Amino acid sequence: MATMNASLLQADFRTAFVREPAALKNHPALVLNADYRPLSYYPLSLWPWQEAVKAAFLDRVMIVAEYDTIVRSPTTEIRIPSVVVLKEYVKPQKRVAFTRFNLFLRDEFSCQYCGAAGDLTFDHVVPRARGGVTSWENVVAACAPCNLRKGARSLRDARMNLRKPPRQPGTEELRNAGRKFPPNHLHQSWLDYLYWDAELDA
């Protein structure tokens, strides 16, 4: 059977699970790395069932759990996979990309000044007008009212405090942050592989 090049795996899977095609609403498959950990916790690494079936036929994944639903072709019938495991290990990226999404995930989708969730933007702790740079160590998630209140002032001048100092997160830190935000739908067959209630490292 054909095998997939590891670099292609990394590129394909990292983009595939952030899409939310309509097919994910019906019988999505949880995709695990070869170490039986989800490729991503937030967003959760899911494939449309058609992709999971195709990957199984191409011998790229092992099916470890199934739905009760069966799909048929003129010559074959198969239970729809609910959990699949990659046969080739996809090495996680060591460097976390500095993106708005990852910044909000690091800060657990809450304002770093007041703790509010929702209506988030981002703020330069040291304002750019005062020489502040756009980096992990100087940008935080902030709600619109706090951002407006602080403006181009320093924390001291604005009499505001950060809930925690901003820093560049590691890959594992973001994975653990993502575990705190399970999706609305969790199929029973996924639970053994997610460990949402596991104690997180400090």
Image: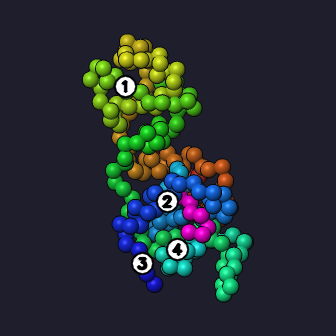
Q: Separation of disc 3 and disc 1 at Cα? A: 48 Å
Q: Separation of disc 3 and disc 4 at Cα? A: 10 Å
Instruction: Please name the residue shown 53% across and 54% down the image.
Output: 19
Q: Point out which mark residue 16 bears.
A: 2
Whole-percent x, y for residue 88 in the image: 42, 72
**Residue beneath disc 1:** 125
Q: The residue under label 3 is which amino acid type?
A: Thr
Q: Indicate which label's residue lies in the foreground, 4 or 1.
A: 4
Drawn side of residue 22 relative to residue 45, left or right: right
4 or 2: tag closer to the N-terminus: 2
Which sits in the foreground, 119 or 191?
Answer: 119
**Residue beneath disc 3:** 3
Label 4: element kind: helix
**Residue beneath disc 4:** 55
Q: Which residues are magenta?
A: 45-51
Q: Residue furthest front?
A: 74
Residue 146 appears anywhere in the view: yes
Drawn side of residue 187 relative to residue 101, left or right: right
Which sits in the foreground, 87 or 26?
Answer: 26
Label 2: element kind: helix
Q: The residue under label 4 is which amino acid type?
A: Ala
Q: Residues within 10 Å of mark 2 (few under 14, many from 20)?
A: some
